[in-house]
Amino acid sequence: MLETVRNMFKIAELRKKIFFTLAIVFIYRLGGHVPTPGVNADVLKNFMSANMDGLFGLYDMFVGGNFGRFTVFALGIMPYITASIILQLMGTIFPYFHKLQREGAEGRKKLTQYTRYGTVIFGAIQAAGISIFISSIQDNGVSAVIPQMKGFLFMFTTVVSLTTGTVITMWLGEQITARGIGNGISLLIFIGIVARIPNQILSEVQQIMVDRMHIAKSLAIIAVIVAATVAVVIMTQAMRRIPIQTPKKVVGAKMYAGQNTVLPLRLNMAGVIPIIFASSIMTFPGMIVRSFAGTDSSFMDELFRWFRPDGVIYSVLFGLLIIFFTYFYTAIVFNPVDIADNLKRQGGFIPGIRPGKKTAEFLENVLARITLPGSVFLALISVLPMFIMRGFGGGFYFGGTSILIVVGVALDTLQQLESHLQARNYEGFMKKGSLRGRR
C-alpha cells in the first residue's frame, strides 16, 4: 500500500490532480467556518444541539456540519442536486430536454447551464424559508437573530449569503470533476460526512468515560457499521456478466480470430445517486415545512412530523424514492437499444440471442431483474441501521445513507486513482483483481 501511495506521487499529472483536489477541499472546509451575518451564535448553538437528532441531523450530515453552525455554506450542494433531479425528470416529459440529453457534449453543456440557473432559484427559495425559521428561534426569550438585523434585512442578507455560498460550492465541485480526482459533487458530500466522524467518536468516548456500561452499546454500533459496510462493498462490486462473442474478421490479407468477452452489468448500476437524490427530495420540503411549524397551523406541525427521519412515514417514502430513482437513473446511464446496435455494428452477439431488437429486449429484461434487488438493498440499508442505532440509545448519527455514500464515493475515487496507475504500468491498490467504481 505504501509503495502504491509513493507511485501516485511519481506521476506528475496524477500528483497535480491530487493536490488540486486537496486544495479545493481545504477551501470548502475553510468556507464552512464563515458565519452568516446577523445570527446570535449562542442561541442558535443551543437550539441546534437540542434538535440534531431528526431532520436537522440528516441535513447537517450532507452539508458537513455547516447548517448546525449556520455558515455561508449552510445549504451545501443540495439545491444543485434538486435542480439536477428536476431537469432529468423534465427530460422524460418534455421533448426539448430529452433532445438535449441525447446531443452529446453540446447538449450536456446547455443542461449544465440550466442546472446552474435552477440551483440559484432553489437556493434562494430554500434560504428564504430558512431565514423565516431562524427568525422564529428563541432561547429564554432571546432571539436567534440580533435586534439590528430583524425583519427584511435579515432575510435579504441570508438569501444573498446562502445562495452565494451554494453557487461557490457548486463551482468548487465542478472544478474537482474537471481538473481533480473523483466526482466533485459526490466528493464534497463525502468530505462533509467524514468530517463529522472524529467529533462523533469523541462523543462516544466521553460517554464511555461517564458510563462504563455504554461501551457495550458502542461495540454494538461498531458491529452494525462494519456489517453494513461489508454488505455495501459486496453489493457495490456485484455484477452480472453477459457473454459476448465476436466472429472472425478478414482485414486485407490478415484474418483476426474471434474473441469471447463479457458485458458487465452491475447489480447497483446507479451507485449512490439514488440515495443523494432521494435525500434531497425529502429534506427540501422538510426544511420548508419546518420553517412554518410551531406556528398556529396544526396542519404544518403534523406535516413536519411526517418528515422526521425517525418516523415510519418518512422511512417508507424515502425507501420508495430510492427504488424509483434507482430505476430512473439506471435507465439514463444504460440504454439497451444503443448497446444492442453497437454490438450489431461490430459483429458481436450474445450466444443464443439474435442481434438487434432481441438483444435489446434480453438486456432490458436482465437489467430489470438485477436492478430490483439492488434498489431494495439500497432502500433497506438506508433505513434499517438508523433504527437499529436509535434502539441502542446512542447519539452516533452514521446510518446506512452515510455508509452508502462514503463507500460508493471512496470506491469510485480509488478506481480512478488505480486507472491512472495501471495506465503507466504501476500496480494498483489490489494485488489480485481490480477495483470497480460506480461508472
Image (tube, rainbow, N blue to C red):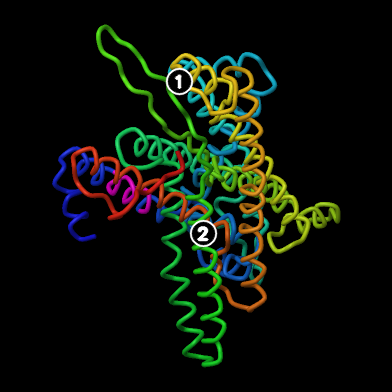
User: Measured from the top left, where is residue 228 in percent x and y?
Assistant: 54, 64
What secondary structure is the stretch in magenta mostly built from? helix
**Residue sitting at x 70%, y 21%:** 93
Q: Give the extent of the magenta segment.
A: 21-29
As helix, strand or loop, the secondary structure at mark 2 comes to helix
Residue occupied by mark 2:
403
Q: Give residue 402's mark.
A: none
What is the CA distance from the residue labelled 2 to the residue labelled 1?
Answer: 32 Å
**Residue sitting at x 69%, y 45%:** 321
Q: Which quadrant does the C terminus fall into? A: top left
Task: State left or right for residue 256 relative to residue 298.
Answer: left
In this rendering, the label closer to the viewer, 2 or 1: 2
For label 1, count other residues whose C-alpha is less than 10 Å away and answer few (under 14), some (14-19) or many (20+): some
User: Measured from the top left, where is residue 22 in percent x and y?
Assistant: 28, 49
As helix, strand or loop, the secondary structure at mark 1 comes to helix
Vertical relation: 225 (above or below) 275: below
User: Measured from the top left, where is residue 438 in percent x and y?
Assistant: 46, 43
Task: State left or right for residue 180 relative to residue 242.
Answer: left
Task: State left or right for residue 21 relative to residue 426.
Answer: right
Asked where in the image residue 141 lies, by quadrant, the reply is bottom right
Residue occupied by mark 1:
109
Vertical relation: 382 (above or below) 275: below
Kind of residue at disc 2: Ile
Q: Is residue 183 magenta?
A: no
